[in-house]
Image (spheres, rainbow, N blue to C red):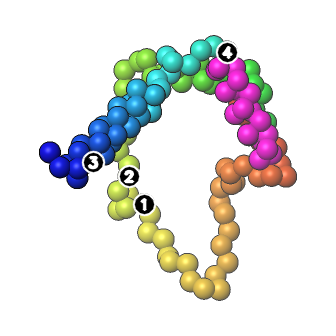
Amino acid sequence: MNDSFQWWLVIVGIGIGVGLAWIVMGRLARSDDDVSDEERRVEAAWISRSIAAYGGVAPPLLVEEVLELHRHYLEGPALDVPPLPEEDDFPDEEPIEEGDTVTETEPRRSVQRNAPTVLGG
């Protein structure tokens, strides 16, 4: 055999080895069963801090309960998802043109930095 063929085999071998290592080292998605109770408490605290950073309020105990409910949801059968409404199902609205004023008929549901949002209450 010549040297170029041997180098080709070395490169292919390295590629296969890297691929196998990637699979073995846990690049596969974790399931909810892989999360311990201690890790769930740490995750709940992290989520609580993240929501608080944007002005919301979500106590860690509430977040733990939500995560536990999510675990039970994943263990159960899949829920039926209703189909999205067709565009024809919406009432006819006039297009908004430049210079028109727009008023909201429903309150905003986004997290605002200045007004705390309380989850679960």
Q: Are marks 1 and 2 in contact (CB under 8 Å)?
A: yes
- In this view, the residue farthest toward the top is 37
Q: Which residue is mark 4?
A: 38
Q: In percent of the image, x 79 and y 44: which residue is there?
A: 53
Who comes first in sequence, dot 1 or dot 2? 2
Disc 4 to disc 1, C-alpha distance: 47 Å
**Residue type beneath disc 3:** Trp
Q: In terms of secondary structure, where does tag 1 sit?
A: loop
Horizontal and vertical percent for residue 100? 64, 82
Q: Which residue is mark 1?
A: 90
**Residue type beneath disc 2:** Pro
Disc 3 to disc 4, C-alpha distance: 48 Å
> Mark 3 or mark 4, which is nearer to you?
3
Q: Are marks 1 and 3 in contact (CB under 8 Å)?
A: no
> Mark 2 or mark 3, which is nearer to you?
3
**Residue type beneath disc 1:** Phe
Quarter that holds the N terminus: top left
Which mark is drawn over residue 40?
none
